[in-house]
Image: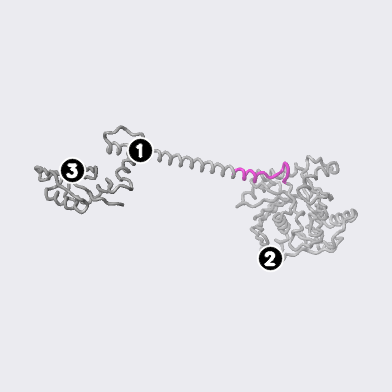
Amino acid sequence: MDYLVIQVEPHRVLAARFGVAGTSLSFSGAAEFPLNEEQGLSAVAGRIAAGISGGPRIVLCLSPALFAQRTVELPLDNLRKVREILPGQLQGEIALPVEEAVFEALPIGNKRYLALWARKVDLRQAIETFREAGCEPQVVTSAPFAWNFLPECPADAVVCDGAALAVVSEDRVTFARALDAAQPHQSIAATLAALELSGVTLPPRLTIFGEHSAGLAAGDGLPLPAERLGMPDALAPLFKTDESFQQLAGLLAVARACHAGALPDFRRSELAWTAGDALVRKKMIVTAALAAVAVILLFVSKGLEYRAAQTDLASLNKSISAMYREIFPGRTKAVDEVAEVKAEIRKLAGGPEAGNSVLDVLKTLAEAKGATINGLYEAELADGTLRVKGDARSAQAVNEFKAALAPFMASVELGEVKSRPDGSVSFTLAGTPKEVRK
């Protein structure tokens, strides 16, 4: 999954794109945009939108000064339910009316949660700025809430980048706040002193990272032993230099936390990200339209097939009627021509008890007549006697026909043979076929 992490600071905007998939990590590039009178946040958002390719998940990190927090203890293990009851739990205990706030929570162990909230109007303004520019963020958060995902960050430490401070206890962020960037050492000392007075047990070390980490670590007046977060050897191929790592480590932590599902997201209730739902609905509408078109095409195809079948059936019925009139010219139109023709064929074929069927005799005549018999225009089998009338090329052909029938006939007699001017003859033939049992 690709993440485009955008961090808005007072005088600049940092943007970096990371690819996170399981234990693998990739870095596609980063850019820094100054914020001044000539180039405001809207202009920077437009430049970022113009450089986006593909479909990364956009995470917008705002200043931690916009977010308030309080530790609450709830007998719940379901983080979704904790988010639902936080407004009622904190109503009357915070200065901001709950209707004007959006709430989130981070689990910190033992059924204790770090309740977070921010003014809707502040977040909505930032969201609208980036939406109008064409790079609407899917997640709105603050980077210190993800500092427990810094590379090789100690499980128990106070983490600071000079502009913000976070307390990480048992690998979870339990406190975060913005610092006075002009006087970071004094601000760190004052914050940690206030935490001690409130009864918080501080971690034993102070981990410093960021572009000004070297100066912060070397400064005096820090209440805890300070160590600078170094670039791990495994990340050297990605960031190349320690300077790049210090500048982008916080954004990398945000991407890793977002991928792990542990990053607080303030796009909830009225600020919920709906572009994804709209895209899903659009895809569903397109899918439904395609399915409807497919169903319509299926019905049209079946309709055309039915129409073609009806046309073929009508043509077949017409052909059957024509054949019926040719076979039975003297009969009136039958109710079912096909059934009547089948019945006549069964009659010609005879039953199992019949010795010779008409069809068998006709087949024998057809095989015996040869090419010299021009045609047989009448054949009758009645009471075991066969009578045939036909035309032949010559009288010799008639005799040959008679001889060819002899093996199949018990008796055969040649009747009247009439000659024609062209040399052909007409003849009659009668005989008794031999009985052949099937």
Q: Rate crowding at label 1 as few (under 14), some (14 to 19) or many (20 or more) other CA atoms within 10 Å.
A: some
Q: Which residue is mark 1?
A: 317
Q: Which residue: 12% across, 43% down?
A: 416
Q: Earlier in the sequence, mark 2 or mark 3?
A: 2
Whether residue 147 is in magenta: the answer is no
Q: Position of residue 362 (x, y in %)?
A: 24, 47
Q: Which residue is mark 3?
A: 389
Q: Nearer the viewer, residue 39 or 200?
A: 200
In which quarter of the view is residue 337 placed?
top left
Q: Classify 406 as above or below 380.
A: below
- Horizontal relation, residue 259 to residue 373: left or right: right
Tell me which amino acid carries mark 2: Ala
- Helix, strand or loop at label 2? It is helix
Q: Classify 389 as above or below 246.
A: above
Q: Are marks 3 and 1 in contact (CB under 8 Å)?
A: no
Q: Earlier in the sequence, mark 2 or mark 1?
A: 2
